[in-house]
Amino acid sequence: MLITTTASLQAIQKVSHRNELDMLRFRPNLIIDLDDHTPFQEEVWIGKEVRIGDAVLSIKKGCQRCAYVNIDPSTQQIDHSVLKTVVKENKMIFGVYPTVVKNGQIQKNDIVRLQ
């Protein structure tokens, strides 16, 4: 399972001077749009638990990215600048890995609460 935030994607998009960057490059299971638009905010959650809907997730570690993020999921064109930007801006980390503490239903627009 992988969690990312829209703020992190927007930061990578801005720094790489791209008009659009598809989140599918990063293959997340959950994309969170936070009120706080600070990029890479999800990494602050490492070692903590978050509640989303009925589920409780323990955030374990950041996701170290590989060259796969360079491949556009729609066109399969390769752009090496995507991974280079992630390396430069956030030490090769984009998104976080959680484990499930409590099973539950997660729905679009559920509130995310740090526990």
Image: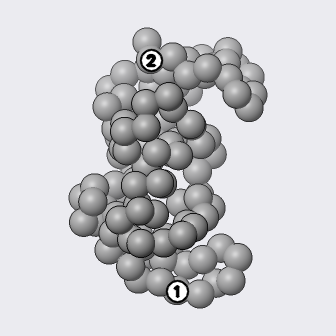
> Looking at the image, is 62 positioned above or below residue 72?
above
**The label number, if any, that marks residue 78 in the structure image:** 1
* Residue 81 against residue 42 in the figure, above or below: below
Answer left or right for 61 relative to 77. Answer: left
The disc at residue 108 is none
Q: 2 left or right of 40?
A: right
For label 2, the residue is: 114
Question: Which amino acid does the dot numbered 2 rest on?
Answer: Leu
Q: Is residue 101 visible?
A: no
Q: Which kind of residue does numbered mark 1 sit on?
A: Ile
In the drawing, does residue 5 fall left or right of residue 62? Answer: right
Q: Quadrant of residue 115?
A: top left
The residue closer to the viewer here, 19 or 91, is 19
Residue 70's place in the image compared with 45, above or below, is below
Q: Residue at x 28, y 55 (%)?
A: 90
**Does residue 19 appear left or right of residue 60 in this picture?**
right
